Amino acid sequence: MANLIAYELLPRIFNMSVTAGIVILFVLLARLLLRRAPKVFSYALWSVVLFRLLCPVSLSAGFSLLGLVDMPTRAATPHTTTVEYVPPDIVHAEDPQVQFPVEPVRTAVNEVLPKGEEQTTADPLEAPTAIATWLWLLGILAMAAYSVASYLKIRRRLVGAVPLRDNIYLADHIPTPFVMGLFRPRIYLPSALSGREQAYIIRHEQHHIRRGDHIVKVLSFAALCIHWFNPLVWAAFFLSGKDMEMSCDEAVVHALGEQIRADYSTSLLRLATGRRRIAGMPLAFGEGDTKSRIRNLVNWKTPKRWAALLAAVVCIAVAGACAANPQGSTRGRYDSMEDFAQQTMDAAKTAVYYTAEGGEATAAVTGTKLAWLEQQGEVDGLAPEGALEAWTFHFLVQVDADDIMLVGGMYEEDGWYDLEGQGGHNVVALRYDDGSYDVLYDQAVNDNLDFYGYHNSYEEAIYDWYVDDQGLDLPLYVEDWTGSIGAPAENLGNFPVHRCDGEGWYLYIPLQAWQRAGRGDSWQSGYGTGSALTVYRQGQDARTQADYLVSQGWIGVEGAVPHVRHWEYDIEDYYYNAPDGGSYQVRIEWQAQNIAGYPYTAIEPDVLRAMAESFTVDEETAPLPTPTPEATAGPLGGVQRGAPLTLCLTRNGDEIGTYDDCWSESNAVYYFNYLQTLSWAAAEENGPYDDRDAVTLSGAGGWTMTAYDGADEVCFSDPAGTRWLKPETEDDSAYEMLRGWFDEAEYTALGGGYDHQSIVVPDVGQGYLEAAAVYVDAFERIHLQASAGSKLCYSFVLTSVEEAEETTSSRRERGKIDERTYCFYLTTVFVPQNEYALGWSMAGNTGDYTGEDPAVPEGALEYYRCGYITLEDDGWHGRLVGTGW
């Protein structure tokens, strides 16, 4: 907390104070121009000073008076900027610089600031910064203590105050009327006031309350407490209070008539407090410069309408020009992305790791090393402030610990550790015209679904993230139709769709199991059912086209656009008006006999309708961002997601397994995206490879891609020939991706995976717990069938189940399960077959085996899960659901 105040907060307060000081000078000049105008305009000008004293950011505008003083601004958010005369954490900067608006002062200060080795090794700015921080905090404390003491003193004088009416009270021991209270303000009057004096003094105080002056006074005092070191702020506090009172005096005289000026002035003189208060409350009638207030009343005349209008224009113009920051000098927080990387690494002081006992611990970071910092894509013209860039970033650490256990994706490299194990970070940065950057998004890559996800390029990912983050009314490239597509008796998981742009229109097509048919605007099901969607251009408008088909026997369907369906065949047409007077015909068709029996095909009519209804006529649709050269340079650049693919594992030249259903597992898109967007370089064949495990990915057209365990190079073959490639980044491994993809495809084919549970236990009269035990044993032992080296391969499995009667009863009462379904707990004791499987299994509540069964090998692990078992007509059906219900 102390570092945050000294290195971040204090520089920000100083910057706000300097900026407000400049604004105060402009306001003082404007007050001279408005000296003959009603004081309400002078009083209104002080609002921009209060804004500058309390708000660290502001919008930028084409014209700002602050642009006259060379103000250094930096983007705080995509739409706001902040002023930085003194940058944050200047104490630890290698080359500290200030940007004061007065050139001689700026030069003099920068010349005496320490530089280079003197600055980085000795930290000479630490001590003066600490002293300044404590002085500032003590000043705030003193101001607050004074205010509290003054408030308590006044409260004691109000003992015995009696209500006059509403929120008005009479008190015997107060010298002058005042307003006290923030949320329920009260007016206190001296008991000795005459009835005439009460009338206009009450009106004076009520005008304060209606205008919110009692709140403004508290905020002004809070600003004074924060900026007590700035003499211009003290001047602003007293002058704004003077303008507040004068404007209120004028309002009362204007309302009651000029004939009361003499009596009003006499009351002012009699009830004057004799001093200026600096506390936030109360608002006293006799407070301030009594002589000036009386002189102002004597000279006051009802203003001409044109004069009041001119004063209002000047007031609004000055306030607006002082509230906005100038454009054109916006600077990002980071000089470069390398600067961002360095600052991020410098900020890493501790790291969390897993101990050999399986628990978590924290260690001090003793060193950091950049692993990679690579630009992946760029989108220009979307953000008004500059260009949006996508980067991937990762660094390694050295820590003060030696009992580190690597789990998940963690690794160690010559004493440097990746303890996050998430594959680095995706970063979205805003690059300004001067080359500086602000980071808008910084999240772990993990499986890359959160950011890159189902996009075809980083440009699409940047675009969708920014549109969603800013709430822009623009069509996304990728949407998720989960929840809008119903599936009979089965959860299909997420349902991503991708925008396809035509000439003046776009629509969304599912990313899996749908592909373009030929080169036209037609898409067909990848399941071979014959289901298809086609877009045609017609010469007549939408209603005319639809009405003609209705006249031929087609059936009209209610909807947002003209929509008809065939009276016999499964064909439907949607019509959308085109800008030139014609229309677009979107035809969907399917064959009912081909889609029954399989949940993924049974929903095709709903999917087709959703696709047709997503059709949008839009001639201004943003053009498809061009992928970066790195993203298309690989051998998979022309392969469409969802296209038929085959994975094959060989060992010593012998085939271990081959699988065609490569898209069924949830991580398939992640593996495909990773491989498709790798940056490749030419390589030489460095065999022999016969003694290595190899995974081959192949597709239509006769192409193959083979990666070998322990080898960087990859063999890519197609009818044009064979070439050897390798990832440009050493940390990228095509074999690891292909092997991981194969392992999951194999495991799914064997019946494993929570999304593919299909084991049925015959009903022979056993209890539900016996059936659950058989189900769990059969399901978990699938790990024993996985190929050696698989991340899902175990060499030992032992399972047990326990009843969960309370959960069963509770979920039945809430209607979550029926009477034929039971909840249970399971424990799986296992031994990973390899290090890869060990790392992959260390998730959820996995830990060391704590039992005493002699049949369990040494070093075994165990985890706990929850499950359901349901008795159906064909037997017991189980479903494991992870670590919670």
Image (cartoon, rainbow, N blue to C red):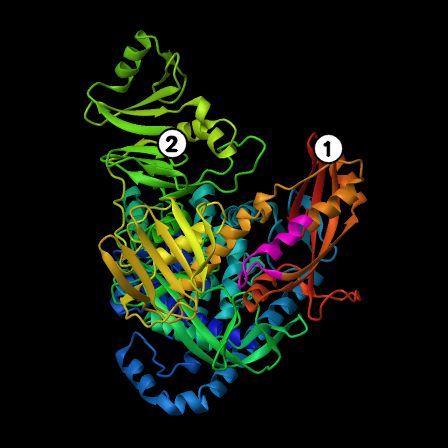
| Image coordinates for residue 117, horizontal then vertical, percent | 38, 91
Are there few (<14), some (14-19), or many (20+) residues within 10 Å of tag 1?
some
With 459 as the anchor, is 364 left or right in this view?
Answer: right
Quarter containing the N terminus: bottom right
Magenta segment: does it hold 477? Answer: no
- Tell me the residue at 38%/28% (across/down): 531
Look at label 1 and name its amino acid.
Asp
Residue 696 sits above or below residue 624 on the image? below
User: Disc 2 to disc 1, how far (Cα)?
Assistant: 36 Å
- The mark total stands at 2
Residue 234 sits above or below residue 539 on the image? below
Residue 525 is drawn in which quadrant? top left
Look at label 2 and name its amino acid.
Met
| Image coordinates for residue 584, horizontal then vertical, percent | 26, 25
Secondary structure of the residue carrying tag 1 is loop
With 361 as the anchor, is 392 left or right in this view?
Answer: left
With 682 as the anchor, is 674 left or right in this view?
Answer: right
| Image coordinates for residue 799, horizontal then vertical, percent | 72, 55
Secondary structure of the residue carrying tag 2 is helix
Give 814 or 79, whichever is nearer the viewer: 814
Magenta segment: does it hold 789? Answer: yes
Residue 402 sits above or below residue 325 on the image? below
| Image coordinates for residue 591, horizontal then vertical, percent | 41, 23
- Tell me the residue at 57%/35% (across/down): 490
Give 516 or 607, whichever is nearer the viewer: 516
Q: Provide the residue designation for mark 2.
A: 611
* Highlighted magenta segment, given as a residue range: 778-794
Residue 292 shows in the view: no
Q: Which mark is residue 818?
A: 1
